[in-house]
Amino acid sequence: MDIETKIELIKRPPTEEILVEEELRQLLETNEHPQHYIGFEISGLLHLGNLMVSGFKINDFLKAGIKCQVYLADWHSFINNKLGGDWGKILKAARYYEEAFKLFCPGAKIVLGSDLYHSNDEYWRRILKFSKHMTITRTLRCMTIMGRSEYEKLDLSQYFYPPMQAVDVKEIGADMPHGGMDQRKAHVLAREVFPRMGWEKPVAVHHHLLMGIAKPVELKTKDKLEQVIASKMSKSKPWTAIFIHDAEDQVKSKLQRAWCPEKQVEMNPVLEIAKYVVFHEKESFEIQRESRFGGSAEFQSYEELENAYRKGEIHPKDLKENVAENISEITEPIRKHFEKHAEFLEVFKSAEIVR
């Protein structure tokens, strides 16, 4: 595959940012199969955002000949009090994440954090050496990567989270760290500090964060990215999420209650799901409705759908019902898989899901 085709695969939605594209080109010119990694905290059930949107991008990388690694960050999950900080539950949940990503992203290598760190003194030396290049203030500014803010009461271990995530890039041998836009600060940190340590500066790729279906969170800040991060679909806020396990009636029920103001296209989570999930999997999208409400209509692109909604040609109720039907169809294979392998979900029946 030629370099231009690889770059197009890497750049296509849901990618929102590459740091930086010229460095990506240089990397591909010198390395036919660069190493990639994306990390996930292990906590609640997987949803459209963290499995499917992330997975779509991983699959693009695989098509481009990139060696993809899905990193299951059990240590980070423990530090961030996921699953109540219960190490046994975190490891059991990790097996569920491994199964899901093997199914959705065949070809990606699954790496468990504790396997990477076990008896690895060099990793911990690197953490301390890296931390010598950080201040407490700089560390606090990175806390959004773990869903925290600099104003929260944090325990000491949580201050090590940002340098650990940055050093993971080096430890796992990744040329291309990848994550949602909420992980940008960790990758920028790595790009700043790595050259000071004599390490190769990585090329970072960030994909779109899928909105939760609740009303967007209103913040005092005018920073659009901060609002997007605060409003993202989250497994720790189940009322905002469409889980990959949700049956058709559950998907319909959730989307019936979703935030979807008439004619509003900005920060509209139902349109977001149509754009980043439905149109990713299908070449067209059909609105089925009674003739007295305009009859059925088919859209060949998301842009057509958005324009029609903005003009009021589609009612929110019709959009919600038809998006729900499509999402149920798209998630059916993976939902059916876990219905046959329910043992992977046992750990969540008694687990505490925290942000």
Image (spheres, rainbow, N blue to C red):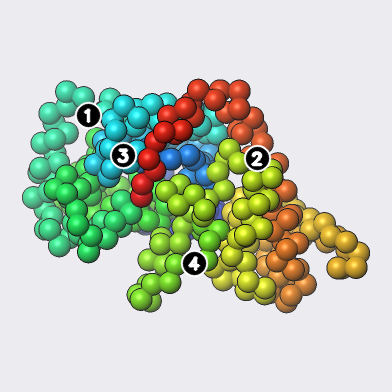
Amino acid carrying label 2: it is: Ala
Query: Residue at the location (38% across, 72% down)?
Result: 219
Instruction: Give the residue pinned by disc 2.
Output: 247
C-alpha separation, residue under disc 1 versus residue under disc 2: 38 Å
Q: Which mark is residue 117?
A: 1
Q: Residues within 10 Å of mark 3 (few under 14, many from 20)?
A: some
Q: Residues within 10 Å of mark 4 (few under 14, many from 20)?
A: some
The answer to whether residue 34 shows anywhere in this view is no
Tell me the quadrant of the picture where the N terminus can be found: top right
Q: Secondary structure at mark 1?
A: helix
C-alpha separation, residue under disc 1 versus residue under disc 3: 22 Å
Residue 95 higher or lower than 54, as above or below: above
Pointer 3 or 2: first along the chain: 3
Residue 116 higher or lower than 214, as above or below: above
Circles 4 and 3: CB atoms closer than 8 Å = no
Q: Which mark is residue 216?
A: 4
Circles 3 and 2: CB atoms closer than 8 Å = no
Q: Secondary structure at mark 3?
A: helix
Pointer 2 or 4: first along the chain: 4
Residue 28 higher or lower than 349, as above or below: below
Pointer 1 or 3: first along the chain: 3
Amino acid carrying label 3: it is: Gly
Pointer 4 or 3: first along the chain: 3
C-alpha separation, residue under disc 2 versus residue under disc 4: 25 Å
187 lies left or right of 92? left
Pointer 1 or 2: first along the chain: 1
Q: Secondary structure at mark 2?
A: loop
